[in-house]
Image (tube, rainbow, N blue to C red):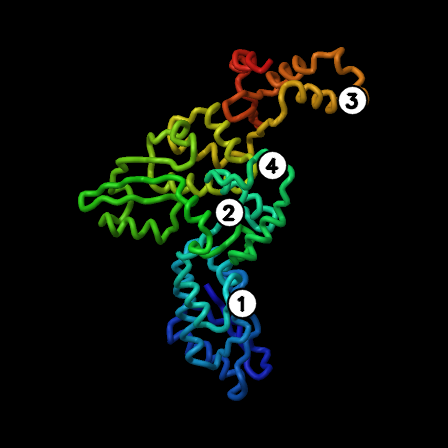
Amino acid sequence: MIQLIMSRNGSPVHVPLRFPSSPGNITAAFRQLSQATQTGKTEIVEIKSVIANLPSYLSGLDPDSRTQLAQLNQLSSIIAQMDSRERIIYAGALDGNSINDLNDMIRVAEQVSDYILIPNVNSDVTLGRYVAVASQIQGDPRFPEAAWPYLDFAKIGAEYYAGHGGAYTYAGYVLRKQDDELVREKKSKMQLDLSSSQAQASVCLPATKEELERVKRTLGIDCFAEAAITKVSFSVPYMNEHIPTTGICVEDANELAWAIEGMQCEDGELLKYLSVLSVEQPGTMQEALHCAMNLDDYERITEDTYEYGRTVLRRIGADDELIDTIDGYMDFEKLGEDTMAEEGVRRTEFGLICRCSSPFAEEIQAMEMGGLS
């Protein structure tokens, strides 16, 4: 999890030491250094870690300090128990806190479950959009969707960041849960009621690995297959109507909940997913999860048939002057409608959608596209 490359007194001999490590391995590494030179201060040539930004925080580490090596061993042991998502969160939590020494690094690592990662939010612009989406879902009138073309998302995000702290990572925005009321209220996308032979419990998804382990301990089970799911409920509108609970398992449900949370951070992605669900009509939750994982294979069409017809002409080289000239002499709506049918565009209650890899069945198109005119 953490590796030190050490040398002593300018010696060309470099000795690696990987943490967490046993006392015997630490002794052996320092014996190698002593064989190169008996005197001088031990220096760190390089620090490697699965936490990308951790080496910069360890730059002042003194490898000759037994206390610091013991602390480093403790920190490495905690990191070793983290899953990949928790490691991303830990990296962000480090950048979002005042870190002065190894004690601070250990404290933050022990509290990683107190932080949340908002996927795909890694700039003031994307954070501003997230705040607007989250506010709209909760009925906050400040950021109606109709006003989004005129909103300064970068300014909204910058003001939110200044007021709530946290840190941007390549995977998203990390902040302490208690610092964001929107995150706390909006986090639960799905709730599962579980029952085992020993107890009953509920779990709100998405959940971290640690949170799921706590539910297992409450139920007295080693894996969720030993428990029955007695109830499934969604907090996101329309999901209960379009996501089946047939063949559900906790792990798939949690992965789907994380995916839905990510969709809420991208303008139009949740509506696209609902459109996909209404057309694909998955029979199981695993199929609904497959749709979520392959959402890039679909395109949401925001134009009506009239504007789509004009777009078709632009594709074949017509400029706006020509299009405006023939306006009134050409049925743009009919052109748009026919082209949509050919390209596999389907109408849903959430908007128009098409599949990129392979168009939806043409005979179904003809039946459903009739309502577009």
Q: CA distance from mark 4 to mark 1?
A: 44 Å
Looking at the rendered structure, the kind of residue marked 4 is Ala
Q: Within the image, what quadrant is residue 357 found in?
A: top right
Q: Closer to the N terminus: mark 4 or mark 1? A: 1
Quadrant location of the C terminus in the rendered image: top right
Mark in the foreground, 4 or 2: 4
| Foreground residue among 66 and 260 | 260
Q: Residues within 10 Å of mark 1 (few under 14, many from 20)?
A: some
Mark in the foreground, 2 or 1: 2
Mark in the foreground, 4 or 3: 4
| Foreground residue among 97 and 251 | 97
Q: CA distance from mark 4 to mark 2?
A: 24 Å
Q: Closer to the N terminus: mark 1 or mark 3? A: 1
- Which residue corresponds to mark 2? 119
Residue 147 badge = 4
- Which residue corresponds to mark 1? 55
Question: Pointers 1 and 3 in contact (CB under 8 A)?
Answer: no
| Foreground residue among 194 and 46 | 194
Mark in the foreground, 4 or 1: 4
Q: Residues within 10 Å of mark 2 (few under 14, many from 20)?
A: many
Furthest-bottom residue in view? 39
Q: Position of residue 303 (x, y in %)?
A: 63, 25
Residue 279 vertical placement versus 328 (above, below): below
Identified at 42% across, 63% down, the residue is 109
Q: CA distance from mark 4 to mark 3?
A: 31 Å
- Which residue corresponds to mark 3? 318
